[in-house]
Amino acid sequence: MKLDDVKKLHQKKYRSQFGFYLVEGEHLILELVKAADAQSSLEGITIYISDEYEDWSRQLPAGLQVVTINRKQMSQISDTKTPQGIIARVPLPDLASQQKPTNKGERCIYLHEVQDPGNLGTILRTLAWFGNFKLLLSANSVDPFNPKVVRASMGAIFHVPIELDVALEDLQKRFNTFAYLDMQGNAVNSAKFSEYECYLFGNEARGVPRKALSKFNADAFTIAGSGAIDSLNLASAVNMCVYQLSVN
């Protein structure tokens, strides 16, 4: 692939067209290489390095394609103001193959039209930390392979199964019971909170559509607070709920 095309991978339409996304930075590249050991879907990685990373790159496994480019070229394909000097071109996962039945004990987190890349990256990081979670994203959500999401995930995106464009109304064909957050709900630290098949979280500003929720077999829960403010950040709310699910 030409470097001019690599640069285009910062845009979603070209990621879809070429079938690759970008991972930037030493930490993320090391996480990627570790994940690639166990996941055949990550084969076909190309790593672009600037001169100062030539010695460092010798620790990478044999067989990885490594291409040395100059600093000007690196700045052209980088998404950051101060490029670290190492970027990987990674094959997009076959999302169709990831739409499998839920594994035993695996919990599903559904995000409806989440917009903030930092929120999504942070949520991915939490799901990877606790493990055995699958992430379902609705249409009109931020692309998980957006460079900002990838960076915020700190490598978690390589470890969490993701499904894209999952319609809210289609969830009822897959799951029987649902939980969601509401100020008037039961406490999330109750034992009952861990009994559901799918956990619904809405857009940062609008939440989960109430009209759609009325058709679900869904129960409301709340994260108790002081009452000094009206709401929690989406990523914070998901993280607290995932923690509760992991300890119950």
Image (spheres, rainbow, N blue to C red):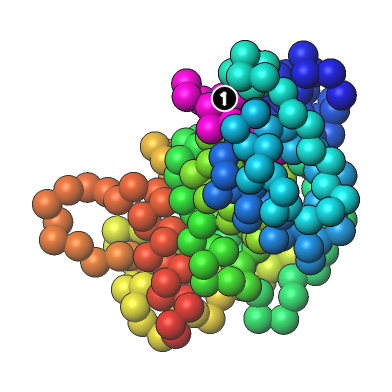
Q: Residues within 10 Å of mark 1 (few under 14, many from 20)?
A: some
- The residue lying at 60 percent from left, 24 percent from top is 78
Q: Which amino acid is tagged 1?
A: Asp
- The residue lying at 61 percent from left, 19 percent from top is 71
Q: Is residue 113 in sight in this rendering?
A: no
Residue 148 x, y percent position in the rendering: 53, 34
Up-down: is 92 above or below 135?
above
Residue 224 x, y percent position in the rendering: 24, 66
| Image quadrant in which the C terminus is located | bottom left
Give the extent of the magenta segment.
78-88
- The residue lying at 42 percent from left, 72 percent from top is 243
Residue 212 x, y percent position in the rendering: 57, 49
* Front residue of 237 and 222: 237
Up-down: is 64 above or below 98?
above
Up-down: is 223 above or below 93?
below
- In the picture, measured across the screen, residue 223 lies left or right of residue 4, that is left
* Front residue of 82 and 107: 82
* Front residue of 63 and 100: 63
* Front residue of 116 and 165: 116
Q: Quadrant of residue 128?
A: bottom right
Which residue is under mark 1?
A: 79
